[in-house]
C-alpha cells in the first residue's frame, strides 16, 4: 500500500515539474514577442484641404528604422529608413463622414523590436477643434524651379521659388503688411510619402510687392526626385492661415550615363536614324527628341543584349530641323537617364548628299579590289620582263636588243 502511495506521489511531482517547465517556456516566448519599446505619438503635422500630413514621433532616446501607419486595423503605409530616425511623415487624404478616420502608428528599431501602437488619432475631431480650419485659405502660390525643366544631374543644386499672388485680396488681409512663412512639400514617387522643407526666416509681404520664398536643395545626391508643391502661411490675429497648394513641379535626377550617338543611315533605299547607346546598358529605352524640345518624338525599347534603336525619319514642318536621342535604364529601382546626343541636322527630310552618299560605300571592299588590281599588274609586268631577258640570251650575235622589249 505504501508502494502505491509513493508511485502516485512521484507521478504528481513529475507532472508538476513538467507543468512548471512548460509555463517557463510560454512565459519566455511571450516576453520575447511582446513589445519592449514605448509607444510613439501620432499627430497632424500639416493640413491643406483634404490632404493631411501625419507625423509619427518616437519618444526621446529611441530611434526607428521602420515606421508603419494603420487606418483603424489595416496597414495603409510604411517607411523604411537606412539609418535610425526619430519621426516619419505620412501623407493621407481624408473623406468627410468616413467612420474609420482613425489612425495609429508603430515603429521598429535596428534590433527588430517593435513598439506598442500609438493612441488612435481621429482626424475629424482635430479638424473641428482647430480654430484655423474654418478660416478661408489664401489663394495658391506659384512654384517654379531652376533649371526650368526640373532635370538635374547628381551634384547640381535645385532652386525653388514660391511666389505669392500679387496683390493678395484686400478681403483676406487685415493689415497692409503681414508675416508670411513658406513651406516646400515633396512627394516621393512610389511610396507617396510627403516631406516638408520649411523656410526658417519668415518675411514681410505687402499687397504691392510680395517677396517669394526661395528654397535651395542640393547638392543633389539622388533622393531628391519627385513632385514638389508649396504653400505659404500668414500670421493673423486669430492664428495661422494656410494657403491652398500651388502647382506641381516634377524633378528628375539623371545619372551620368554616357551620351549616345545619333547618325543617319540608309538600308534598302530607306533612310532612318540610328541611336547607339553604351554597350554596358543593353535593353535600354531610347527616345528621339527634336532639339530644344522636352517631349520625345518617338520611343523604342532596344532588344535584349542590344544597345541601339532605329527610328524612322520624322516628317518635318520646317526646312531644317535638328534631332537628339537619349536612353534610360532602370537602376536600383529608379530610372537613370543619359545625356542627349549631339544634334543632327536634317534638311527637309532629305539627307545631305555628300556625307551620306559616301557613307554607303563599302570601303574595305573597294580597297581590297584596288590592291588586287595593283598586284595583278605588277605580276604581269614581271612576267613580261623575264620573257624579254630570256629571248635576249638566245640571240647572242645580235648587236641590239629587240625593239618590242
Image (cartoon, rainbow, N blue to C red):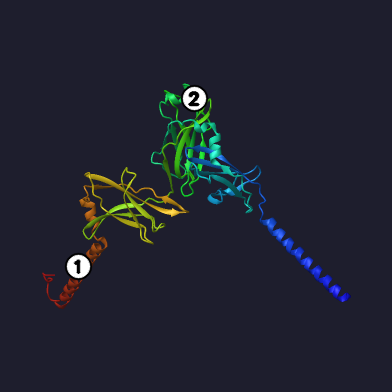
Most foreground residue, 9 or 107: 9
Quarter of the figure with residue 29: bottom right
Residue 131, given in percent of the width and then of the height, sits at: 54, 31
Q: Is residue 218 visible?
A: no
Q: Residue furthest bottom?
A: 394
**Residue depicted at x 22% and y 61%:** 268
| Residue indicated by mark 2 | 178
Residue 352, given in percent of the width and then of the height, sits at: 22, 50
Most foreground residue, 181 or 399: 181
Q: Is residue 166 left or right of residue 43?
A: left
Q: Is residue 360 visible?
A: yes
| Residue indicated by mark 1 | 377
Q: Residues within 10 Å of mark 2 (few under 14, many from 20)?
A: some
**Residue depicted at x 52% and y 31%:** 132
Q: Secondary structure at mark 2?
A: strand
| The N terminus - image quarter | bottom right
Residue 158, given in percent of the width and then of the height, sits at: 45, 39
Labels 2, 1: front one: 2
Residue 170 sits above or below residue 193 on the image: above
Q: Secondary structure at mark 1?
A: helix
Residue 229 sits above or below residue 66 on the image: above
Amino acid at each position: 500500500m505504501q508502494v502505491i502511495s509513493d508511485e502516485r506521489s512521484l507521478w504528481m511531482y513529475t507532472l508538476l515539474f513538467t507543468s512548471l517547465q512548460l509555463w517557463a517556456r510560454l512565459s519566455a516566448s511571450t516576453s520575447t514577442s511582446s513589445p519592449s519599446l514605448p509607444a510613439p505619438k501620432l499627430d497632424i503635422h500639416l493640413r491643406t484641404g483634404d490632404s493631411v500630413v501625419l507625423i509619427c514621433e518616437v519618444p526621446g532616446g529611441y530611434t526607428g528604422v521602420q515606421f508603419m501607419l494603420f487606418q483603424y486595423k489595416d496597414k495603409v503605409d510604411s517607411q523604411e529608413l537606412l539609418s535610425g530616425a526619430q519621426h516619419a511623415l505620412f501623407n493621407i487624404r481624408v473623406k468627410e463622414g468616413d467612420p474609420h478616420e482613425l489612425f495609429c502608428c508603430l515603429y521598429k528599431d535596428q534590433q527588430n523590436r517593435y513598439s506598442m501602437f500609438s493612441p488612435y488619432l481621429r482626424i475629424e475631431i482635430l479638424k473641428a477643434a482647430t480654430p484655423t480650419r474654418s478660416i478661408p485659405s489664401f489663394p495658391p502660390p506659384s512654384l517654379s524651379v531652376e533649371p526650368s525643366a526640373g532635370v538635374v544631374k547628381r551634384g547640381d543644386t535645385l532652386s525653388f521659388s514660391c511666389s505669392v499672388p500679387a496683390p493678395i485680396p484686400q478681403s483676406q488681409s487685415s493689415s497692409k503688411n503681414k508675416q508670411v512663412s513658406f513651406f516646400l512639400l515633396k512627394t516621393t514617387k512610389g511610396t507617396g510619402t510627403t516631406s516638408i522643407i520649411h523656410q526658417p526666416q519668415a518675411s514681410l509681404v505687402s499687397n504691392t510687392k510680395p517677396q517669394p520664398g526661395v528654397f535651395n536643395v542640393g547638392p543633389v545626391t539622388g533622393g531628391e526626385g519627385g513632385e514638389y508643391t508649396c504653400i505659404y502661411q500668414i500670421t493673423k490675429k486669430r492664428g495661422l492661415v494656410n494657403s491652398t497648394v500651388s502647382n506641381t513641379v516634377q524633378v528628375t535626377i539623371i545619372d551620368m550615363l554616357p551620351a549616345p550617338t545619333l547618325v543617319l543611315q540608309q538600308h534598302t533605299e530607306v533612310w532612318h536614324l540610328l541611336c547607339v547607346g553604351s554597350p554596358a546598358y543593353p535593353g535600354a529605352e531610347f527616345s528621339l527628341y527634336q532639339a530644344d524640345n522636352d517631349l520625345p518624338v518617338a520611343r523604342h525599347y532596344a532588344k535584349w543584349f542590344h544597345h541601339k534603336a532605329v527610328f524612322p525619319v520624322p516628317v518635318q514642318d520646317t526646312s531644317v530641323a535638328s534631332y537628339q536621342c537619349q536612353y534610360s535604364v532602370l537602376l536600383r529601382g529608379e530610372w537613370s537617364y543619359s545625356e542627349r546626343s549631339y544634334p543632327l541636322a536634317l534638311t527637309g527630310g532629305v539627307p545631305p548628299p555628300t556625307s551620306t552618299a559616301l557613307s554607303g560605300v563599302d570601303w574595305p571592299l573597294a580597297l581590297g579590289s584596288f590592291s588586287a588590281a595593283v598586284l595583278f599588274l605588277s605580276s604581269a609586268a614581271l612576267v613580261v620582263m623575264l620573257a624579254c631577258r630570256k629571248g635576249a640570251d638566245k640571240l647572242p650575235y645580235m648587236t641590239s636588243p629587240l625593239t618590242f622589249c
